[in-house]
Image: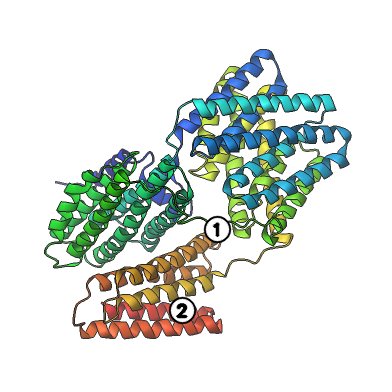
C-alpha cells in the first residue's frame, strides 16, 4: 500500500536516475529555466578545465617557490590563454591562442610603460586600445573573444606602471604564461574538436525524451503549470535553433572531417525538429486527457528511442544500424493509424529513417565542403553598430579608471574589467550580463574573503587548481557560475602575492565589479543608445500572428504539405520563444507583479496551447473534413486577420491584450 511518505522518495529516485544521461539532472535545469536562469549542463568541459588548472596552478607554485610576486602576471596570462582557446581544429585553436599571445604581449608592455609616464598618457593609451579592441568584434565570434581578453590585458596592465625596461620584463612574463598555457592546451587531454556540437545535438534528443517522459506522471502538481509547459517548449526550440546554427557553420569547412561531421549532425537536428512536432502534439493531448495504456506504451517507446539516438550522437561515428530496432518498433506501433499517438509514432519513424539514411551516406561518401549555412558576418569596420560599441567601451573604461583613482580604490583594474565584459552592442544583452556579473562577483567575493580569513597559505595555493578548472569547465554552462569561480580565483591569486589578506581583497573585488558593471550599463544606456527591441506587447502580437498563421494552415480543409507547415511551425516557435524570453527578462527586472506582464504571460501560454492543438489538427486531418474542422478553420482565419489589423494600427493597449486573451480562449473552447 502506497503512503504519502513514499511520494518524496519517488521524486528523489527519479531525480537520481536522470544522472544516467547528463552530468546535471534535466529536472534541475528546467526548474532553473522556469525561473529565467539558463544552464547548459551538457557543455561542461572537464578536460578543458583540467588543462587550465594545470596551467595556472603550476605557474603559481613556481611563483611561490621563487618568491616572485610579479609572476602572478604569468598566471593571469596562462588563464586568459586557456579562456581564449575556442576549441575545434588544432590549426584554428593555435591561431587564436598565438594571436592573443602576440596582442597581449604588445599591449602589456605598451600600457605598463604609458602608466609609468603618468595619468594622461596611460588614460589616452587605455582609451585607444579599448576602442580598437571593441572594433575588432567585427571579425566574428573568435575575434570577439580575443579582443575582449586583449582589452582585459590592457586594463590590468595600466595598474602595473613600469619603466621601459620594467615593461619589457612584464611582457616577458606574459609571454612565459601564454606559451606555457598553449603547450598545455595543445598536448594535454586531447578533446574531440566537435564534442560541443555533438553534445548539443544529443541534448536536444535527451530533452525531448524528458519532455515526453513527464507525460507519464500527469498527477504531479508542477508538470502542467503554464510556466512549466512554456519552459520545456521554449528550451527545446532554443536548443534546436542554436544547435542548427552551430552545426551549419561546420558546412563551410574544407576539411573532410569537418564536412563529415556536418553531414552527420545536421540531419540529426532536422530529425529532432520533426520529432518535436509529435512531442508537442503528445503533450497537448496528454494534458487534455490522461494517456490511455496504449498511448503510454507509445510514449515509453518514444522515450527509449530518443535516449538511444542521444547516446549514438555522442559517438564520433554514430552507427546507423543501431536505430533499426527502434524504427521497427515505431513502425509496428504506427501501423494501426487509429489515433494521434500511433500517427506520431509513424511520423517519428519516418524522421529516424531519414536520419539513418543520411548517416549511411556519410559513411560511404562524406561531402567535401559546402557553403550551406555559412553565417553572414558584417565585415565593414565603419559599420555604425561596431563604431558605437567601440566608443562606448573606450569611454566606459576611461570613466571607470578615473572613478577608481578618484575614490582611491584598491585593485582598480577589476572595475575596468567589469566594464569590458559587461558592455555589449545590445542594451538587453548588457542588462542581462550586468545582473549575472554582479551576482557572480558578490557570491565569489564573499566566498573568497571567507577562504582568505579561515585558510592557511598552503590551502589557498592548493585551491588555485580546482578554481581555475571550474572556471574554464563552466564557461559555456552558466555565466554567473563562471564569474563566481573566476572571482575566487583572482582574489586568492592576488591574496597569495600581496600583503593584503582576508576580507580586503574579496570585498574590494566585489565592490569594484559592481561599480564597473554599472558604469558599463550606463555607457550602453546613455552613449548613443541603440534602438531598443520591440516592446513586449508588440512581440506578443507578432507571436500571436505567427501562431495563428500556423493554425490556419494546420486547420485548412485541404491538408497542407509538410514543407509549408514546417516553415510556419518553425516561425511560430521562434516568435513565441522571442516573446517569452523578453517576458522572462521583465520578471528579472522586478516586474513580476506588473498587470501587463501577467497578461502577456497568459496570452503566450494560450499561444503555446494553440500551437499544440494546431499540430494535432494537422496530424488528424481527414478527407472530407468535418463540419467542426471547417468552423475551426474559419475562426482561425478571422482571428488572424483581426490580429494583423491590430498590428498595422499599433492598437496595443491593455484593452486590446485583454480582448485577445478572450478571443484565444473562445477559439480554444470552440475547437474542443
Which residue does the numbered mark 1 point to in the structure image? Answer: 376
Helix, strand or loop at mark 1: loop
Q: Closer to the observer: label 1 or label 2?
A: 1
Looking at the image, residue 241 lies above or below residue 634:
above
Looking at the image, residue 91 lies above or below residue 623:
above
User: Residue 561's image quarter?
Assistant: bottom left
Question: Percent x, y for residue 408?
Answer: 81, 38
The answer for how far apart the CA atoms under marks 1 and 2 are is: 40 Å
Looking at the image, residue 111 lies above or below residue 27:
above
Q: Residue at x 45, y 56 (%)?
A: 372
Q: Residue at x 65, y 44 (%)?
A: 148
Question: Percent x, y for residue 253?
Answer: 48, 47
CB contact under 8 Å: marks 1 and 2: no
Question: Percent x, y for residue 316?
Answer: 35, 38
Looking at the image, residue 281 lies above or below residue 142:
below
* Quarter containing the C terminus: bottom left
Q: Nearer the viewer, residue 242 or 596?
A: 242
Q: Is residue 551 visible?
A: yes
| Residue at the extreme top of the image, as rendered | 65
Which residue does the numbered mark 2 point to in the structure image? Answer: 658
| Number of the label disc, if any, that sits on residue 150 | none
Q: Residue at x 22, y 43 (%)?
A: 322
Helix, strand or loop at mark 2: helix
Taking the image as shown, residue 479 lies to the left or right of residue 310, namely right
Q: Nearer the viewer, residue 386 or 61?
A: 386
Taking the image as shown, residue 598 lies to the left or right of residue 220, namely right
Taking the image as shown, residue 118 lies to the left or right of residue 502, namely right
Q: Is residue 446 visible?
A: no
Colour scheme used in the picture? rainbow
Question: Badge 1: how crowded within 10 Å, few (<14), some, or many (20+)?
Answer: few
Amino acid at each position: 500500500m502506497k503512503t504519502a511518505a513514499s511520494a518524496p522518495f519517488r521524486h528523489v529516485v527519479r531525480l537520481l536516475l536522470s544522472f544516467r544521461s547528463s552530468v546535471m539532472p534535466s529536472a534541475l535545469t528546467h526548474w532553473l529555466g522556469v525561473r529565467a536562469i539558463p544552464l547548459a549542463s551538457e557543455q561542461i568541459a572537464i578536460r578543458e578545465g583540467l588543462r587550465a588548472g594545470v596551467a595556472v596552478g603550476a605557474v603559481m607554485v613556481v611563483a611561490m617557490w621563487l618568491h616572485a610576486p610579479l609572476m602572478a602576471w604569468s598566471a593571469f596570462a596562462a588563464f586568459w590563454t586557456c579562456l581564449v582557446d575556442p576549441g575545434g581544429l588544432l590549426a584554428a585553436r593555435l591561431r587564436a591562442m598565438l594571436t592573443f599571445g602576440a596582442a597581449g604581449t604588445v599591449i602589456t608592455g605598451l600600457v605598463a610603460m604609458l602608466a609609468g609616464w603618468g595619468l594622461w598618457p596611460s588614460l589616452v593609451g587605455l582609451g585607444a586600445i579599448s576602442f580598437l579592441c571593441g572594433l575588432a568584434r567585427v571579425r566574428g565570434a573568435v575575434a570577439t573573444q580575443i579582443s575582449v581578453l586583449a582589452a582585459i590585458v590592457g586594463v590590468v596592465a595600466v595598474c602595473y606602471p613600469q619603466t621601459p625596461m620594467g615593461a619589457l620584463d612584464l611582457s616577458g612574463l606574459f609571454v612565459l604564461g601564454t606559451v606555457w598555457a598553449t603547450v598545455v592546451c595543445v598536448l594535454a587531454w586531447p578533446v574531440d574538436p566537435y564534442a560541443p556540437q555533438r553534445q548539443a545535438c544529443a541534448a536536444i534528443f535527451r530533452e525531448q525524451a524528458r519532455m515526453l517522459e513527464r507525460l507519464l506522471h500527469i498527477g504531479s502538481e508542477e508538470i502542467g503549470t503554464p510556466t512549466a509547459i512554456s519552459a520545456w517548449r521554449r528550451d527545446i526550440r532554443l536548443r534546436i535553433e542554436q544547435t542548427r546554427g552551430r552545426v551549419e557553420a561546420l558546412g563551410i569547412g574544407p576539411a573532410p572531417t569537418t564536412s563529415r561531421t556536418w553531414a552527420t549532425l545536421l540531419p540529426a537536428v532536422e530529425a529532432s525538429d520533426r520529432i518535436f512536432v509529435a512531442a508537442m502534439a503528445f503533450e497537448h493531448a496528454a494534458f487534455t486527457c490522461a494517456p490511455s495504456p496504449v498511448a503510454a506504451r507509445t510514449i515509453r517507446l518514444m522515450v527509449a528511442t530518443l535516449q538511444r539516438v542521444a547516446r549514438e550522437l555522442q559517438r564520433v561515428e554514430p552507427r546507423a544500424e543501431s536505430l533499426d530496432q527502434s524504427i521497427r518498433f515505431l513502425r509496428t506501433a504506427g501501423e494501426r493509424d487509429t489515433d494521434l499517438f500511433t500517427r506520431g509514432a509513424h511520423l517519428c519513424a519516418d524522421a529516424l529513417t531519414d536520419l539513418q539514411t543520411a548517416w549511411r551516406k556519410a559513411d560511404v561518401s562524406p561531402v567535401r565542403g559546402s557553403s550551406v549555412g555559412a553565417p553572414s558576418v558584417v565585415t565593414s569596420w565603419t559599420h555604425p553598430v561596431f563604431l558605437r560599441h567601440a566608443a562606448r567601451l573606450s569611454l566606459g573604461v576611461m570613466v571607470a579608471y578615473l572613478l577608481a583613482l578618484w575614490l582611491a580604490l584598491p585593485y582598480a583594474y577589476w572595475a575596468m574589467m567589469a566594464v569590458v565584459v559587461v558592455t555589449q552592442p545590445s542594451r538587453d544583452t548588457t542588462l542581462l550580463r550586468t545582473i549575472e556579473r554582479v551576482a557572480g562577483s558578490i557570491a565569489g567575493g564573499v566566498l573568497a574573503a571567507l577562504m582568505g580569513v579561515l585558510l592557511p597559505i598552503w590551502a589557498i595555493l592548493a585551491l588555485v587548481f580546482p578554481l581555475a578548472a571550474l572556471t574554464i569547465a563552466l564557461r559555456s554552462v552558466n555565466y554567473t557560475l563562471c564569474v563566481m569561480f573566476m572571482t575566487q580565483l583572482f582574489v586568492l591569486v592576488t591574496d597569495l602575492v600581496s600583503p593584503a589578506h582576508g576580507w580586503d581583497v574579496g570585498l574590494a573585488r566585489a565592490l569594484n565589479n559592481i561599480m564597473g558593471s554599472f558604469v558599463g550599463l550606463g555607457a550602453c544606456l546613455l552613449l548613443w543608445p541603440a534602438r531598443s527591441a520591440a516592446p513586449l506587447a508588440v512581440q506578443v502580437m507578432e507571436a500571436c500572428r505567427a501562431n495563428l498563421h500556423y493554425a490556419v494552415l494546420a486547420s485548412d480543409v485541404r491538408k497542407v504539405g509538410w514543407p509549408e507547415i514546417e516553415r510556419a511551425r518553425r516561425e511560430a516557435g521562434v516568435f513565441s520563444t522571442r516573446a517569452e524570453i523578453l517576458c522572462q527578462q521583465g520578471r528579472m527586472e522586478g516586474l513580476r507583479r506588473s498587470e501587463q506582464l501577467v497578461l502577456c504571460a497568459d496570452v503566450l501560454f494560450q499561444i503555446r496551447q494553440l500551437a499544440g492543438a494546431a499540430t494535432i489538427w494537422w496530424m488528424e486531418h481527414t478527407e472530407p473534413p468535418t463540419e467542426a474542422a471547417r468552423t475551426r478553420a474559419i475562426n482561425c482565419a478571422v482571428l488572424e486577420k483581426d490580429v494583423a489589423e491590430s498590428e498595422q494600427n499599433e492598437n496595443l493597449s491593455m484593452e486590446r491584450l485583454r480582448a485577445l486573451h478572450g478571443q484565444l480562449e473562445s477559439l480554444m473552447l470552440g475547437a474542443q
